[in-house]
Structure formats: C-alpha cells, structure tokens
Image (spheres, rainbow, N blue to C red):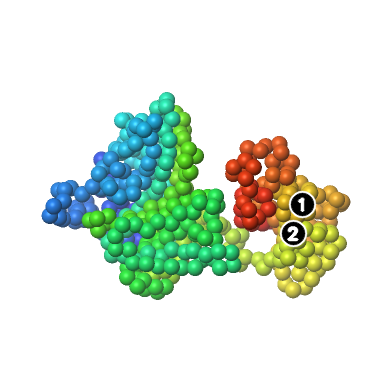
C-alpha cells in the first residue's frame, strides 16, 4: 500500500487515511482484518440526483475551500484576506501506527502539520498545528480537530452539571444541523465537560456502537456534532478563542489541544475500558500499578487555622484509621488567612510554621504515610505580592471581579502535589 492510503490498526478499531492530494479520514470503525486500495474505492458514495458528481470532502481540517458548507475546522484571516485555506499534502511520514502529515497552502501563506496515532488500546490521538508563512499576522478565529463518524451514529450524549452534581448525562437524536457545546468560563468546568459521544440508536453501557471524543484542554472549548445535508456526520473539538485572542506572526505555530477518541462496538463500557487503559499506560502512570492511596486532606478540619502540633495529632489519628497519604491543604503559605489574599505567593508562612514543614513531614512519614501539599499554580489573588509585581498574569478585565466570589483572577480547580 502506497503512502497515499494509510491504514492504522488496533485490536478493536482501525483508521484509514487518504493522504493525497489532501488528507481525509475515509474510515474509522471496527477492526479490518484485510484492507486494500480497492476496499477504499468501495467507500465512495454514490452520486445522488441533483448533487455534484463528486462529494465535497470532509478533510482533516474540513476546509470551506473544498466546498464544505458545514462548520469548517479552520477559520481566520489576514486583514480580511486568506480566509479560506485549501491545504495540499506535501509530506507523509508513516511509522507503525503513527502518521505525520505536512500540508501547504501557498496562496494563503499557511502550513498545516497533522499528527495522528492509533494506540494499541484503540484510542486515537489527533492534533493539528498551523504556521503562518507570511510577514503579516494571520488572525486565528477557530482551529479544530474534525473526525468523521458513521451515518448510523444518530444519537448524541453529552454531560452537564454544577458543583456537587457533576457529570449529568443528557442525550438526543440528531437528524440534521448540529449540536454544539461551548464553555466560556476560562477553565474546564462542572457545567461543561470537554467530551462528546455519538452512537447507534439506543446505545447503552454494554451494547451498540459508540464513537467518543475527549479534548485534552482545561480552558474555553467548543464541541460539535454535525450532520451535513447529504447525511454525512462528523465530530469537532477545539479550544475556543475569544476575539483577538490568537494571532500568528510570521513563523509562529498554533497547535490544537490533543483530541483523544475511541470507537467501541460494545457500548460505553468498551469505550471506557479503552480510555482507562490508555490513561493508565500513556498519561498517568501509577507507580508499580498499585492502587491509588487513601488520603486525608486537612481542609475541612482546620481551614486556614494551621497549628503544626495540632496537624501532627491529626496525622496520628489518620494513620490509626489506615490513611496512606496525608495532605496539608490551603493556608500553609505566606499571608493566606482567608480567600481574599496570597494566592500566588507560594512561600511557607513562617509565622504558622516557625520551624518549617520538616518536622510535620518527618512525623507523617514516620507513621508510614506519604506526605502531600496542596497548591494551585494557575490561581492568583490581586492582593498578593506576585500580582503586584506582575499584574499581567491575571486573566480578566482590569478592575472587574465576579460579583459572587472573592476577587481571585480565575475560578478554582484544586490540585495536590506529593512530596
């Protein structure tokens, strides 16, 4: 098989990419025991009455320039020009189950790099990078990953929620047009989980075909399930850029976040197993494949009132209960006595810990537990030394704070870091 047709394989799912003259995924579905160029020809759709003799392709970037009148995968301009890129493949690099493509549009002055890999778990990872080749800036409005799905994938499942009521599923039958999820909160939120699933009618945990995508992005995002007027379907996922947020100078490249995708012929459970395997083997590698430790977090026990002697007594009680990791939460760093100040000043509060953290850490470890400390490096309070020294770190309109929360520049996902 030449480099104009690439067949990526896994035990449960395969992907076939036509690379020339432009890149297009022509198959994503159950594993194919045999595949040839002639089989690819059989995927060509018949010509319908009243339509063009050749279908407008759903390319990797779903370009408007190819005549695709659905949502394109790339939108931008150069002072109103070069707004309809049309990429032609210039380089194909194929090794194992990984494919890298380079495409060019000399008219628009843009280069596209695409990375596609199919893991043994069945999880497909895709990302694109667009480079500006001209002296004048190219304003990026949208840059998305587009994946075609079978026409039988008529039901869509997504997730919504709020604090303490996360991951509430909702589903619908999509017969035409599109279903769009947008998150504009500045971070991945309880309200908008960056994943979307589509599948055959009445798919469930154990039966039905499903195609699922998860965008590896913690900021604003947009997810879309689209049906073209001719019945073809595709999924899109992207970082959502606000007006003027992203412009490429000459030589600069913008990459999409990775999109992780999975096909399962055995319902949601089969898809979950693929994602779990990929996550454990490729992204988060737990030491020795041991179970995650049971941990105790000090937050509700002491809030901002940190006393090392009391914390060590908490550790004694935690160890007696069988806790395996002891984590000191918010309030350990300089000036952090309430929600209004000090986020960003990640230095130990010597008033609360006059002998440092070492005595606490040593005590925790002597009890057979791991020690962890809470930190959220993405957060900052305007009332902090860091913000006063670097006000440009804040994401938001100057002088304006949300009315329903203390004035921290970003909302607050939480992280802990083990020592």
Residue 273: x %, y % from top left: 46, 66
Quick one: label 1 or label 2, which is nearer the N terminus?
A: 2
Q: Nearer the viewer, residue 99 or 417?
A: 417
Q: Nearer the viewer, residue 391 or 272?
A: 391
- Is 34 placed above or below 6 here? below
Residue 31: x %, y % from top left: 32, 62
- Residue at (34%, 32%) from the top-left corner? 81
Residue 400: x %, y % from top left: 62, 45
Residue 328 image label: 2
Residue 172 located left or right of residue 418: left
The tally of labels here is 2
* Label 1, residues with CA under 10 Å away: few <14, some 14-19, many ≥20: many
Residue 415 visible at all = no
Residue 308 visible at all = yes
- Residue at (52%, 65%) from the top-left corner? 161
Quadrant of residue 374 within the rendered picture: bottom right
Quadrant (top left/top right/bottom left/bottom right) for the C terminus: bottom right
Q: Nearer the viewer, mark 1 or mark 2?
A: 1
The secondary structure type at the circle numbered 1 is loop
The single residue placed furthest to the top in the displayed view is 135
The single residue placed furthest to the left in the displayed view is 49
- Residue bearing mark 1: 336
- Residue at (68%, 53%) from the top-left corner? 406
Quadrant of residue 392 within the rendered picture: top right
- Residue at (78%, 54%) from the top-left corner? 337
Residue 414 located left or right of residue 369: left
Separation (CA) of disc 1 from disc 2: 13 Å
């Amino acid at each position: 098989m030449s480099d104009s047709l690439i067949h990526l394989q896994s035990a449960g799912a395969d992907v076939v990419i036509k690379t020339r003259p432009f890149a297009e995924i022509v198959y994503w579905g159950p594993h194919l025991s045999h595949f040839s160029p002639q089989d690819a020809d059989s995927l060509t759709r018949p010509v319908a009455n009243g339509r063009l003799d050749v279908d407008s392709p759903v390319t990797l970037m779903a370009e408007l320039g190819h005549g695709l009148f659905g949502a394109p995968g790339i939108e931008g301009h150069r002072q109103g020009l070069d707004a309809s890129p049309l990429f032609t493949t210039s380089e194909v690099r194929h090794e194992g189950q990984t494919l890298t493509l380079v495409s060019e549009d000399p008219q628009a002055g843009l280069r596209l790099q695409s990375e596609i890999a199919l893991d043994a778990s069945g999880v497909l990872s895709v990302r694109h990078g667009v480079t500006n080749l001209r002296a004048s800036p190219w304003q990026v409005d949208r840059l998305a990953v587009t994946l075609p799905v079978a026409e039988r994938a008529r039901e869509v499942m997504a997730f919504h929620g709020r604090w303490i009521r996360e991951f509430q599923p909702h589903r619908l039958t999509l017969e035409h047009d599109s279903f769009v999820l947008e998150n504009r909160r500045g971070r991945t939120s309880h309200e908008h989980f960056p994943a979307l699933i589509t599948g055959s009618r009445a798919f469930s945990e154990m039966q039905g075909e499903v195609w699922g995508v998860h965008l590896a992005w913690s900021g604003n995002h947009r997810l879309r399930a689209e049906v073209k007027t001719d019945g073809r379907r595709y999924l899109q996922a992207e970082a959502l850029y606000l007006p003027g947020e992203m412009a490429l100078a000459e030589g600069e490249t913008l990459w999409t976040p990775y999109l992780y995708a999975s096909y399962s012929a055995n319902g949601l459970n089969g898809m979950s197993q693929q994602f779990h395997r990929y996550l454990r083997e490729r992204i988060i590698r737990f030491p020795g494949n041991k179970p995650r430790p049971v941990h105790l977090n000090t937050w509700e026990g002491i809030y901002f009132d940190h006393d090392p002697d009391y914390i060590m007594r908490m550790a004694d009680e935690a160890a007696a209960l069988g806790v395996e990791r002891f984590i000191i939460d918010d309030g350990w760093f300089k000036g952090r006595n309430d929600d209004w100040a000090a986020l960003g000043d990640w230095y130990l509060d010597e008033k609360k810990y006059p002998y440092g953290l070492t005595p606490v850490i040593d005590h925790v470890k002597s009890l057979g537990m791991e020690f962890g400390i809470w930190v959220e490096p993405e957060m900052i309070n305007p009332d902090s030394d860091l913000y006063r020294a670097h006000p440009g770190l804040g994401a938001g309109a100057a002088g304006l704070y949300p009315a329903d929360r203390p004035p921290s520049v970003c909302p607050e996902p939480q992280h802990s870091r083990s020592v």
